[in-house]
Amino acid sequence: MHLRPVKNDDADQIIWIIDDTFQEYGDKICLEGSESDLNDIEHNYQSPDAAFVVLESEGEILGSHAIVRMEANKFTFRRLYVRADKRGMGAGDLLFEWAVEKAIEFNASDSIRLIY
């Protein structure tokens, strides 16, 4: 397993993982609403104020995570999802640790807020 920056070509797999997770709770993804950032991931997350990675194994995306600057030293974690069949194997831990390290790299000092 390894982390790498997201590409727009990853969108279909990421959307499937997120939608599959939402369906576990009786919901579905809304690409015209709160998940519209997934329509152009590179544009929305590749900037000095944001980052988005996927966890990949043998060309298959297992999960995703993003961090976005909210204010000068405040960041939010977004898009932490792991495929249902890959949970319990440390994937979520790797993704979360990446986000904490990225927040420190971005000089987050006030707080980190989680958005699901």
Image: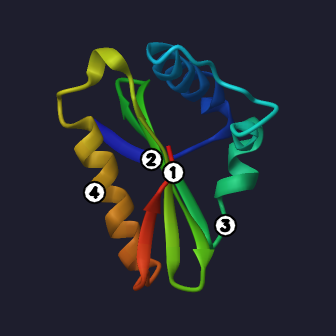
Decide: is 66 above or below 92.
Answer: below
Name the disc covering residue 22, or none.
Answer: none
Q: Amino acid at mark 4?
A: Glu
Seen from the viewer's position, the closer of residues 23 and 51 is 23
Secondary structure found at label 2: strand
Q: Earlier in the sequence, mark 1 or mark 2?
A: 2
Is 79 positioned to the left or the right of 29 in the image? left
The residue identified by callout 3 is 47
- In percent of the image, x 43 and y 84: which residue is there? 107
- In percent of the image, x 33 and y 65: which residue is there? 100
Q: CA distance from mark 4 to mark 2?
A: 14 Å
Secondary structure found at label 1: loop
Q: Closer to the observer: label 4 or label 3?
A: 4
Choose top left, top right, bottom left or bottom right for residue 98.
Answer: bottom left
Is 111 positioned to the left or the right of 26 in the image? left
Q: CA distance from mark 2 to mark 3?
A: 15 Å
Q: Amino acid at mark 1?
A: Ile
Name the disc covering residue 4, or none.
Answer: 2
Q: Position of residue 39 (x, y in %)?
A: 76, 36
- In percent of the image, x 40 and y 85: which residue is there? 109
Q: Amino acid at mark 2?
A: Arg
Q: Earlier in the sequence, mark 4 or mark 2?
A: 2
Name the disc covering residue 115, or none.
Answer: 1
Density class for disc 4 (Cα within 10 Å; few <14, some 14-19, many ≥20) is: few
Q: Position of residue 79 (x, y in %)?
A: 51, 43
The colour scheme applied to this rendered structure is rainbow
Q: Quadrant of the N terminus?
A: top left
Looking at the image, the residue that sits furthest to the right is 32
